[in-house]
Image: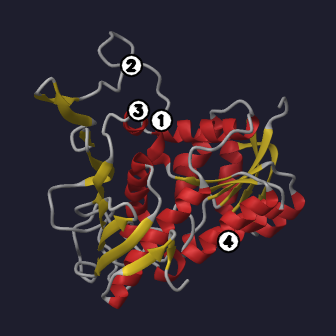
Amino acid sequence: MNQKLRIGIIGCGGIANGKHMPGLAKLSNVEMVAFCDTVASRAERAAAEYGVTGARVYEDYRTLLEEESCDVVHICTPNSSHAEITIASLEADCHVMCEKPMAKTAAEAREMVSAAKRTGKKLTIGYQSRFRSDSEYLKKACERGDLGEIYMAKARAIRRRAVPTWGVFLDEEKQGGGPLIDIGTHALDLTLWMMDNYLPRYVVGTVFHKLNKRENAANAWGSWDPEKFQVEDSAFGFIVMENGATIILESSWALNTLLEGEARTILHGTEGGADMEDGLRINGEEFGKLYTKKPALGTKGVAFYDGKTETEADREARLWIESIVNDTTPRVLPEQALVVTEILEAIYQSARLGEPVYFRHGRILGE
């Protein structure tokens, strides 16, 4: 493919500016030609900073899809609109990168998978934690069998006090939930990917609203407004897979703990284990002795040279575009992201009902 891929950005807020557009801007084989946001000034700023000469600005994604001949669309909007915009973009003959989580509900996520299959276009979800150096190293170790059968894991996304107070993060209707669907989704995706296990059997979940109504609370981004804090402050899940493997999922924006950690996984296998608690550590037994291995994932130590500076966001953008140019499979498959959404929904449902939620062949019973 000699021509540059034409990219449209739908949603020009924090994640678009913090990850998507900077990553795409470093690629020589793409050009951002159209920008859409319900707040026109945000789209105008994005176009001025990242767009090609003559890049156009829109307030309605439908108009963008009608008037622009984009090859790729990046969707960086609230969770409640992911499915609608993704399906419309796929049907407009665009490949789609949609921000995580895949959708607000599992039913919507399934519609997205169906649309991708129907149109033959590529669809991926923005789980950038898979593109970290530690994640890539650990995935190779898992694929080689260094850990053996992984039968127990923890997916951790714990903040002591870091509630996002901007945008729509605290809006139940637009987001579908709080830390579980926002950061817990990254930890769960990472864990399932390492285990290569996408068949849940049942889920038990608990959801808490213990700290979200406090006035003048300590918080990384300033005190939250208790009246606007509609979602949970923490949520936990116990997930049993069809083969008996078990995952404990921990997620919180506000929890009284010193054991913080975000988008991390802890794995226990028959041949070894791994964690991300102090860098990447892999443990096992060899020659009758226990060992702990801590890979050096950086290049520091050489005077005046710190190595390549490709971030996880840069790598995510590059590999996504390469999958389109070379017609290869994206690293994050929509079918995998669908299972993440189904498990998250089951945790919320279990907490609401006060009982386990069961699956059959990867689908919640009754759906």
Q: Which residue is mark 4?
A: 111
Determine crowd level at label 3: few under 14, some 14-19, many 20+ residues with C-alpha closer than 10 A: few
Looking at the picture, how far across and down is residue 116, in whole percent?
73, 60
Q: Residue at x 34, y 67 (%)?
A: 239
- What is the spatial separation of the Cα atoms under label 4 and label 3, in whole angstroms? 34 Å
- What is the spatial separation of the Cα atoms under label 3 and label 1, in whole angstroms? 25 Å
Q: Nearer the viewer, mark 3 or mark 1?
A: 3
- What is the spatial separation of the Cα atoms under label 2 and label 1, in whole angstroms? 13 Å
Sequence-wise, the earlier of marks 4 and 3 is 4
Label ID, residue 311: 1
Q: Amino acid at mark 1?
A: Thr
Q: Nearer the viewer, mark 4 or mark 1?
A: 4
Question: The residue tagged with tag 2: helix, strand or loop?
Answer: loop
Of the pair 207 and 160, the residue shown nearer to us: 207
Q: Amino acid at mark 4?
A: Glu
Determine crowd level at label 4: few under 14, some 14-19, many 20+ residues with C-alpha closer than 10 A: some
Label ID, residue 195: none
Q: Which residue is mark 3?
A: 144
